[in-house]
Image (cartoon, grey):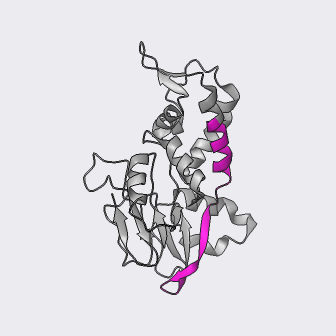
């Protein structure tokens, strides 16, 4: 069986519960945004790497990669990181905390660096791995007579551009940030995440598997979900 998992966002415990519901020896693919907001992003990456699960690049991984260039260069001599960086404000703080690389100063509430060689080395290794993630994965299976393509955000409407190198910036922008669902005349069947939905609708010409796992306090969200390609089944925890 092949299971496509929605945005995990560091919610490692939910991920373990979900995978335990899968048939053994199944193929597992993640739609990106495996990090940030939840408290155990490092454990999520560790699990995926250890099991050689497939994963596409999400916008949160891209932000983490971009920020890492500065962080790795300056670490640990960053006395005050502040809240000015977009990644820090959008869940990056929790990710760095999961590696025990930062802490909150108990006197003024500011973010300060921890000296932690083991966590820093793991962070650097994980960044290298994140840089290797593709923008999309095209499967051999079809659905509704269309090839299945896994991406983080909807990429179907620019699929005709992917084979031309000159369009790589447009393709990347769509695959990481697009919020619009695919048009009905799309030439691929796109399975993606990025934009939380309360329930996965398997009757549409695409499937959004992000059910907002990290938004547990919001109505109709807060679940981690997966879609099984062979059975058309949705599993949520």
Q: Nearer the viewer, residue 142 or 108?
A: 142
Q: Residue at x 59, y 51 (%)?
A: 50
Q: Nearer the viewer, residue 170 or 39?
A: 39
Q: Report whether residue 29 is seen.
A: yes
Position of 100 relative to 205 (above/below): above
Q: Residue at x 52, y 79 (%)?
A: 186
Q: Is residue 70 left or right of residue 237?
A: right
Position of 213 relative to 104 (above/below): below
Indicate the position of residue 9 as horizontal and vertical percent values.
Answer: 45, 48
Indicate the position of residue 66 as horizontal and vertical percent values.
Answer: 63, 42
Position of 85 relative to 220 (above/below): above
Tell me which segment is drawn in magenta: 122-146
Residue lying furthest front in this view? Answer: 24
Indicate the position of residue 183 as horizontal and vertical percent values.
Answer: 47, 76
Q: Is residue 198 left or right of residue 171?
A: left
Q: Report whether residue 187 is seen.
A: no
Please tell me in which quadrant of the rendered image residue 121 appears: top right
Q: Nearer the viewer, residue 96 or 45?
A: 45
Q: Is residue 221 magenta?
A: no
Please tell me in which quadrant of the rendered image residue 108 appears: top left
Residue lying furthest right in this view? Answer: 165
Q: Is residue 131 magenta?
A: yes
Q: Nearer the viewer, residue 27 or 63?
A: 27
Indicate the position of residue 17 as horizontal and vertical percent values.
Answer: 38, 54
């Amino acid at each position: 069986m092949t299971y496509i998992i929605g945005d995990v966002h560091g919610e490692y415990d939910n991920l373990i519960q979900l995978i335990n519901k899968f048939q053994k020896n199944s193929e597992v693919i993640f739609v990106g945004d495996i990090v940030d907001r939840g408290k155990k992003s490092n454990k999520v990456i560790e699990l995926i790497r250890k099991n050689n699960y497939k994963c596409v690049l999400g916008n949160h991984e891209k932000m983490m990669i971009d920020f890492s260039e500065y962080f790795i260069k300056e670490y640990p001599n960053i006395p005050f990181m502040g809240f000015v960086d977009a990644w820090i404000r959008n869940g990056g703080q929790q990710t760095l905390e999961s590696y025990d690389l930062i802490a909150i100063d108990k006197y003024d509430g500011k973010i300060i660096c921890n000296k932690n060689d083991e966590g820093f080395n793991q962070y650097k290794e994980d960044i290298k791995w994140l840089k290797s993630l593709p923008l999309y994965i095209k499967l051999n299976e079809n659905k509704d007579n269309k090839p299945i393509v896994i991406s983080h955000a909807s990429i179907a409407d620019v699929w005709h551009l992917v084979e031309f190198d000159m369009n790589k910036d447009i393709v990347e922008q769509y695959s990481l940030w697009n919020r619009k669902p695919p048009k009905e005349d799309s030439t691929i069947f796109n399975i993606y995440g990025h934009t939380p939905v309360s329930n996965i609708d398997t009757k549409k010409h695409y499937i959004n598997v992000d059910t907002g796992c990290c938004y547990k306090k919001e109505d109709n969200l807060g679940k981690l979900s997966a879609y099984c390609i062979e059975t058309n089944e949705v599993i949520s925890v």
